[in-house]
Amino acid sequence: MSGIILSASVRQNLLSLQSTADLLATTQNRLSTGKKVNTALDNPTNYFTAQGLDNRASDISNLLDGIGNGVQVLQAANTGLTSLQKLVDTAKSIATQVLQAPAGYSPKSSTTSATTVGTAANLVDGTNIASGDTLTIAATGGGTATSIIFGASESLDQLNAALAGNNVSASLDSTGKLVFTTTNDAASATLGAVGGTAAAFTGVAAAPAPVADAASQTIRANLVSQYNNVIQQITTTAQDASFNGINLLNGDDLKLTFNETGKSILNIQGVTFDAADALRTEASTLGSNLSIVQIRQDFSKNLINVLQTGSANLTLADTNEEAANSQALATRQSIAVSALALANQAQASVLQLLR
């Protein structure tokens, strides 16, 4: 082939055709792939920069799955807390009904002093109760046993304040005697033995035990049963509020990673919920963490879009421009073929002379 001699014009036209074909192939490749930079040979700087941006976008996209699961874990816990709050409200309602229901015993255990005493303003009359005299009442209904030393003045209000810790209250009857009675919170208890050095409390009769009211007991027992069932449901509901094996209401912790280096993280500590926990405080904490995770989720999505857009700006081709280039190169190629034919006409004329 080295022995073949082409004229300068033919060689020039061939080179032009080859160059046009190369450019046309490049343009068609860009149109087919949509990219102007397909390999490092096209533009090393743009290629590797775009690859780095795409890699980071891919890493963050992979983290989005974990963040999405984290959102669902928090949503499950939030759903559990909402249900727990409703159960707690139900339990409070039942407890209120119990408090408003009959005590279940009638009458309350009670006894009266042996003699009259002073007035409500000052029980110390100097005879039946004198300064230095004592009053004792044994422990009543789980209360603290009473031991009082009277001074020169002791009002009924002061006496009741001293008796409160023993589930006992005192009042004056129409004859001026002191009446000791168990309080509502200890309606089922028997009043402790009353005694002391004061004449008013010497030989006081033992208080009879309260008499159970069957109807009231049934009502209270049903309410207590309902209350206990609700309390049990509080515990089991907390144990069921899990997602993908993680339950923030049953002692599990949640760790979320927000960036590809693992340096941006959020640790959410779970709690073991039962009926004694403070729901409102935990709900506030959970809501705050959920807000943070959702904000980071949106941020990651937007950041992925920014990275991918940056990569596209470095590598994507302008299809309108490349289409115009393709048309121009096709026209140039046709012109070059015609020019090559014209260049060969001179040699064809020589051939005619030789014939």
Image (tube, rainbow, N blue to C red):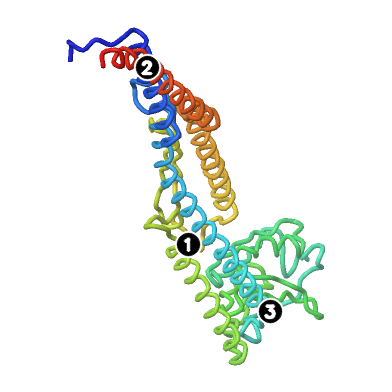
Determine whether the residue tagged by mark 1 lies in a helix, strand or loop: loop
Residue 306 lies, with reference to residue 198, above or below; the image says above
The residue at 46%/57% (across/down) is: 249
Relative side of 221 to 67, left or right: right
Relative side of 157 to 6, left or right: right
Of the residues shown, which amino acid type is indicated by label 3?
Thr
Earlier sequence position, callout 1 versus callout 2: 1
Determine whether the residue tagged by mark 3 lies in a helix, strand or loop: strand
Q: Which mark is residue 302?
A: none
Residue 201 at x, y = what percent?
Answer: 65, 73
The residue at 44%/68% (across/down) is: 236
Label 1: how many Cα within 10 Å (few below 14, some 14–19, many 20+): many
Residue 340 at x, y = what percent?
Answer: 38, 18
Locate the N terminus by quadrant: top left
Query: Which residue carries the number 3 mark?
Result: 112
Mark toward the viewer: 1 or 2: 2
The residue at 48%/29% (across/down) is: 326
Tell me the distance, in whole angstroms, between the alpha carbons under discs 3 and 1: 46 Å
Locate the C terminus by quadrant: top left
Residue 199 lies, with reference to residue 316, above or below; the image says below
The residue at 77%/74% (across/down) is: 172
Q: Which mark is residue 274?
A: 1
Query: For this rendering, which residue is in front, 97 or 134?
Result: 97
Residue 16 at x, y = what percent?
Answer: 39, 16
Query: Which residue carries the number 2 mark?
Result: 345
Earlier sequence position, callout 3 versus callout 1: 3
Tell me the distance, in whole angstroms, between the alpha carbons under discs 1 and 2: 101 Å
Label 2: how many Cα within 10 Å (few below 14, some 14–19, many 20+): few
Query: For this rendering, which residue is in front, 110 or 223?
Result: 223
Residue 43 at x, y = what percent?
Answer: 39, 19
Residue 107 lies, with reference to residue 198, above or below; the image says below
Of the residues shown, which amino acid type is indicated by label 1?
Asp
